[in-house]
Amino acid sequence: MKKYFKIALYLAIIGLAAIIAVNYYVKSSTKKNIYYSLKKFPKNDVGIIFGAGINGDQPSKYLKDRLDAGILLYNSKRINKILLSGDNGSNEYDELTVMKNYCFSHGVDTTKIFIDYAGFDTYSTMYRAKHIFNIKKATLISQKYHLNRAIYIGQKLGIKSVGFPANSGEYRGYQYVTFREYLSIFKSFFDVLRNREPHFLGHQIDINGVSNYSKDDKR
């Protein structure tokens, strides 16, 4: 039993070291791409806002702050278009309708809003941004804990990416999601390495073409 315990312990130590090393690499290689000052923020044509949960027909605190940050960038002319990406897996849970209604009610031109109905995780969002929406450069809008991973995936998939932190006040469970991010970064590192293809792809929706904001648009 001692022999097996030692083997398990060595494997655990190796696994922990690998997770720490990958996280250090991802964070150190992307931290320069996160901008905290709106005045110094580079202009991009497209801003990508990631889904983060809803409460009925209202965005969660995480999502509301992401949407507000995206709208701020739009109103400040730091981005021209917004790609909303989230979970639309069922009629009972539809992040995208909540997200696009929020943007519309806060003055964003619907012709400048594009919808990714299959952004089930960060990797899928960035992969589809590249291969479905034909995005080459983007501003990524999320809380700080999430931006290193999103930027890393975007850069590796061929999207020149910068990040804008949406943090505003305190968040329920923020320490937990920050800790969980270590594992998410580790997983994403290997998603990129093996060039994982998302389960859902679909028809092309060129970001320079006509918006698919309308619910009648089945693309």
Image: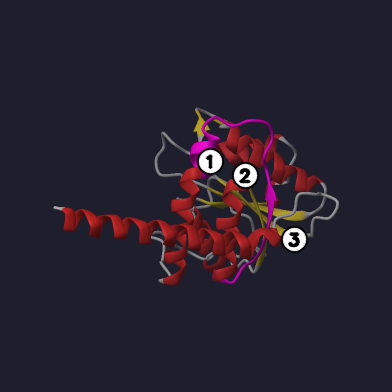
Going by the image, does 73 lie left or right of 163?
Answer: right
Q: Is residue 188 above or below residue 183?
A: below
Give the structural element (helix, strand or loop) at label 2.
loop
- Which portion, as a residue range, is magenta? 157-178
Q: For the residue marked with disc 3, what is the amino acid? A: Asn
Circle 2/circle 1 CB separation < 8 Å: yes
Residue 84 showing in the rendered view? no
- Where does the image place residue 73, in percent across and percent down from the top left? 76, 48
Classify 10 Å Cα crowding around label 3: few (below 14), some (14-19), many (20 and above). some
- Residue placed most toward the observer, 51 or 155: 155
Give the structural element (helix, strand or loop) at label 1.
loop
Closer to the N terminus: mark 1 or mark 3? 3
Closer to the N terminus: mark 2 or mark 3? 3
- Count of marks placed on residues: 3
Classify 10 Å Cα crowding around label 1: few (below 14), some (14-19), many (20 and above). many
Query: Mark 3 highlights which residue?
Result: 44
